[in-house]
Amino acid sequence: MAILQPTSLADVQDAVRQSERIRVRGGGSKPALSTAADGVTQLDLAALRGVREYEPQELVFTALAATPVAEIEAMLAAHGQYLPFDPLLVDRGATLGGVVAANTAGSGRFRYGGVRDFVIGVRFVDGRGDLIRGGGKVVKNAAGFDLPKLMVGSLGRLGVLVELSCKVFPRPAAYASLVVHFPALPPALEALYRLNTSAFDLEALDLAPTAGGALALWLRIGGPADVLAERLDRLQNALAPGAMGFARLQGEEEAHFWRERRELSWVPSDFSLVKVPITPGRLPDLEARLATTDVVRLYSVGGNLAWLAWPPHSPRAAIQALLNELGLTGMMLLGSPDEPLLTPLPGAAFFHRVKQALDPDGRFV
Amino acid sequence: MPDATVSSLGAQTVGEVTGPFLAALEQTLPPGRVLTRPAELIPYESDALTAYRERPLAVVLPETQDEVVSVVRLCHRYGVPFVARGSGTSLSGGSLPVPGGIVIGLNRLNRIVRLDPRQRLAVVEPGVVNLAISQAVASYGLYYAPDPSSQPVCTIGGNIAFNSGGAHCLKYGMTSNHVLGLKAVLPDGEVVTLGGESLEAVGPDLVGLFVGCEGLFGVALEVTVRLVPRPECYRTVLAAYRSLAAAGAAVSRVVASGLLPGAIEIMDALAIAAAEAAVKAGYPQDAAALLIVELEGETVQVEKEFAYLLTVLQDPTLAATERPYEVRVAQSEVERLAIWKGRKAAFSAVGRLSPDYIVQDGVVPRSRLGEALAEIERLSKQYGLRVANVFHAGDGNLHPLILYDGREPGAYERAEALAAAITRMCIAMGGSITGEHGVGMEKRAFLPEMFGEDDMEAMQRLRRAMDPLELANRGKMFPGDPTAATRPGWLPHPLERAGVISRM
């Protein structure tokens, strides 16, 4: 297996032109997605790192694709800003380009949107070796096709991301969280639906089985420190019907909890992790199938994102069969390197046309 | 650059195919829904960019998704270009007809297919009016967030094609941030489903690519949008400044303060005078600039943040010239709506100050707003034309209104030259040629100034992958396609004259 380590954008263009089949690697935090198979050139972008532009009062930055998200977060934090889509696996070395290509947003994306909502500009090398720019460096922009969004979740198959511009937001001054326990899924879902049609501003809303058929909702709020307790009181009152217990998280304990969640520390070691987009109304179907299995579940983003952790040696075909039967899509985020997309995706015909336009020779695998 | 043989294909074959094509259309749609008589076509000749005008071969009015698909397939079979159109409120000429082509009027495709408030989503057809979605879900405490000023009449289909914005994009983004899934017919008649109902997805964001394609990738047939909860509380402040630069600097301070307002807007003296004349908003009349900042959220938090906002605006360590000389806080929903009414009426109201005007739409980095405004003022003097400024300051989205008198020889040309100079200023400052109106006819010459050759070529390849014959909304976005008949001078959109819609 050839490994190429470009140190400039021109190097990336050369590497693309001279390689028939390519898989891109950034920080290596998601080997299931970035490991090149036999006969495929591994394009290791690690050297393409560094923030190109950042003006705090602009709330926009531009960075090379393999810039570690941790570095970006530290830079933003010094000015009270953050990436509201809550990128995953930051401590494990996730890069900005990897987060965009894999579309890995965490629980915190509930409030303001996911990766797609914060990437405003992109430069990538297409399958012909051309360096293409899309979008821009301003937060509102309707000029030309929205190539930055197209690249979100593209898994490096439409081009090699080399530079990204993102918008950021001011970070809430403080956070607090509420854990609400329910005896079963129906009352937990009812509570979630009540929240969906209420005016509570939640930074995160996660749902997960606990033990013995019970479940819990985790709610995170953010804002000035001295109003959070009152806001939690109101939330607790609204959620009282059907709930069987409450707990509050604050300070370092609270921060630690959500940091662990975004680092996927809850996934047992050696389990593979599958990302499944869903809607809360479909959760009963999924729970009915998984409640009596060893699959560990976290329903994040207000029930819009199911994280399913499968025990070691779970047959890939079994996972695929379940998803297909329920009409769901899925991507293997942690696991053995293989085709990460487990199911057919909507818009395959449209994707094929896009692929033909940007990577006609099928270099990016 | 488009392939010359492809571009001329339509024109060469129109004469030969017109008869059979029209006959096929009339077999596809019931009587009365294929319009060909000149009197019937006139209302479709233009959109809100009234300087451009073109008579289509025919206008069809499908009522079902299947009818749209059939019409698109006929267009493909006969090589006839088509333009999909909603209410025709495009300010960039996005729904201008193509010579020899047809217009597919989608207003009758206006069913709300499904409302699912518990999952915060709605499935609608493209002819549904923007505001109708919010009205349909208001009783659940939800609304559809993107709020272009034409929202009482503009349709979701048009919003999707042009990725429409509005005054509240700062916090919640533009149209594309609110579309979860869609069904569309591609220009060769293939029907695709993109995205779904979830907030999350795996695989490339194809919905994101489709939104903002300016109709070049086909016609959206059914759209799944996300809904957001109506905030418990709004707090709105109006601050009057003695200089435009001071208001611009205040925007930077608010953005840097750690607050995240729902909207930050500025109007200059000319716009204030116009708004006052039109709707008597009660604005301070001697201000050089008005700043509107609105916070929204849970009451207990908004009250706290609003007090902080007022201290940011009235910071006593600032020079007196940098502070507002008057600050008004909306004390009720009525007062809040009065502030917004003046703001939203400002554009059409400028018509009271000048017989003609051009609406510009451009973006600069928000920290360079002050610089941009000074440059616009300099250009205004250089070209000898008044410019009124109304803009989404929090996003750096400028809307200069260039006032001129079309009866004065050369005035329209000077106004266009001034508009071009402002567009180039946006590019030079690292901004964009359009924030929310789209490229359309109006800005197509400027897209290659903002993007490089390879970028343009990649976008053309994408376009041809969807539409090898370049039938869908031909002539928009990309330069060099056949130009439409233009006419100096500007006329208000009929709905604008009626005071139903405005331009920003």
Image (tube, coloured by chain):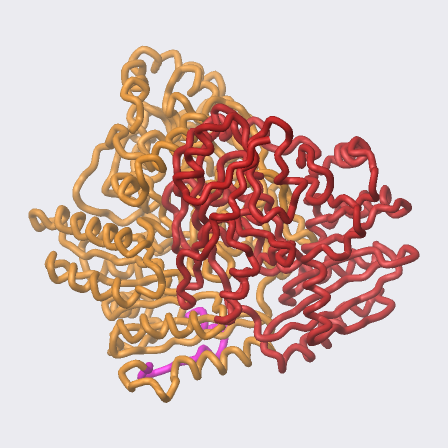
Q: Position of residue B130 (x, y in %)?
A: 49, 49
* Residue B35 visible in the picture: no
Q: Which quadrant of the figure has residue A146? A: top left
Residue in the image at 68% along x and 44% along y: A333
Looking at the picture, tell me which residue is in the foreground, B40 or B302.
B302
Q: Which quadrant of the figure has residue B454? A: top left
Looking at the picture, tell me which residue is in the foreground, A155 or B169.
A155
Q: Which quadrant of the figure has residue A182? A: bottom right
Q: Is residue A47 left or right of residue B327?
A: right
Q: Which part of the image, by quadrant, shows the C terminus of chain B?
A: bottom left
User: Which residues are the magenta region?
Assistant: B323-338
**Residue B337 belongs to the span the image colors magenta:** yes
Residue in the image at 29% along x and 29% along y: B1
Looking at the picture, tell me which residue is in the foreground, A206 or B408.
A206
Q: Position of residue B261 (x, y in %)?
A: 48, 69
Q: Is residue A163 above or below residue B19?
A: below
Q: Is residue B475 left or right of residue B67?
A: left
Q: Position of residue A198 (x, y in %)?
A: 66, 64
Residue at the left extreme? B409
Q: Which chain is orange?
A: B
Q: Is residue B140 left or right of residue B75?
A: right
Q: Is residue A184 left or right of residue A39?
A: right
Query: Which shade of the palette goes to chain A?
Result: red
Residue at the right extreme? A212
Q: Position of residue B501 (x, y in %)?
A: 37, 53
Looking at the picture, tell me which residue is in the foreground, B69 or B439.
B439
Q: Is residue A324 above or below residue A214?
A: above
* Residue B257 visible in the picture: yes
Q: Is residue B256 above or below residue B357?
A: below
**Residue B113 belongs to the span the image colors magenta:** no
